[in-house]
Image (cartoon, rainbow, N blue to C red):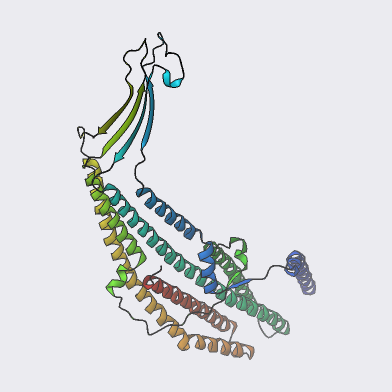
Amino acid sequence: MIVAITQFKRSLQGFVAATLLFAAAPALVCAQTPSRAPVALSLVEAERMMFERNRELQAARRAQESARAESMVAGQGANPTLSLQTININPGRGVGAGGPRDKTVDTTVRIDQLIERGEKRELRVAAAERLEAASDADFAEIKRQQRLALHNAYFELALTQEKSTVLADTAALFAKSLEAAELRLKAGDIAQAELARMRVDAMRAGNDARASEADRTRAQLALAYIVGREGDARLLRAADAWPRPDASLAEGVPAELIDRRPDVRAAQARLEAFERARELARRLRTRDVSVGAQFEHWPQSEANQQGSGNSLGFAISIPLFVRHAYGGEIRRAEVDYDAAKDSLARVRAQATGEFGRAWSDLQSAADRVRRYDDGLLAEARRSADAAEYAYKNGAIGIMDLLDARRTLRATQIDAAVAQADHAKALAAWNASTTLAE
């Protein structure tokens, strides 16, 4: 009976192995099919691609172009108006004989020109120029933010790559250990329970490796969007090494550096633009005038004795502030100016807080990296190697071996996370102190 059960188990294992081989055959064929090579990106190359293809930067460039067009519009004076009028057409008596100049109708050609007073045009131009300067600073700010987003996505991809390597190596180690354990089970060196424990950990390691591949794919897609390479997302690979902690970075930031940041410069330029817009609203109470000149042709005839022949006329138009005196426009401009002042104060405060947070995060992340570099990771490797050696020689049990492997894997992943956190913190510090133009 026992022999029959053993033969059944072997047949079942053979059937399962054949089924798995059949299921994996298409994947093996696809793996042998030539595909495009991975694209190993350096951070410098990724930045170059971002400046060329990033959609947020393209939208910011369009905003710059729009602001420049608004400056052109603000500098344009009012166009004159040409009017042509024909009146005194009498259907009963007719318009007389002869050519068009002899018709007994009153024809007027008139031209009118608006004359702005109170330096309104100059104030409009000044406000538009400050808004154009704000759009230039906005572009620099978006470039700074996109560079930071690029660095974060790049180092996130580097982290997922390292985690995938660690977890794939762990899964491969469990696969080899499982093969050796099955041989030892047949030889009677280990119990069935030890093999079952190793199988469970091997399956967990395989699941973790597959999950890390999904994380890497998401990181590739995020980086690909920033650099404008969505079609090649699965091929992107971060090639740069982790940046090393730098103990020479200064903690303090000069106050003038805050005022030169692009986001602060943009808020300052908008405040100046709304200041000029407020003055422009006040100048609306300075009346603009329209002047006009006309030429009138009204020939006489027997039927029309009122014709005056050719005559000239002049006119001037002045608005009457009867219903309102632009109080609403002035009040709105005052509110916009106050809002711009509040916005500038808020942006300055945010920039100051960003400096402090970036510095604190950078120092904390650098300390973590140093602790791993100073021996924590090496000790975990030595402990795992010692456990592997002891298990092979029967000095420890399977649980001690699995614990050592889990500790090494967790330490390796934590070290990679610490490196990624330091790289991102360094990028945030550089972004907060760099004056992008």
Residue 264 screen position, x and y as percent: 32, 64
Which of 337 and 368 lies nearest the eye of the viewer?
A: 337
Q: Total label count?
A: 0
Residue 308 in percent (x, y) is at 32, 20
Identify the image quadrant of the N terminus: bottom right
Q: Is residue 202 left or right of residue 104?
A: right
Q: Quadrant of residue 374?
A: bottom left
Observer-nearest of 238 and 62: 62
Closest to the observer, 153 or 9:
153
Residue 237 in the image: state x and y as whole percent: 59, 71
Q: Nearer the viewer, residue 227 or 84?
A: 84
On screen, residue 124 above or below 305: below
Residue at point 54%, 67% (across, down): 49
Q: Farthest residue toward the top?
A: 92
Image x and y of residue 195, in percent? 65, 78
- Does residue 154 appear to the left or right of 339 in the view shown? right
Give residue 176's quadrant in the image.
bottom right
Seen at 63% across and 91% down, the residue is 393
Q: Quadrant of the C terminus?
A: bottom left
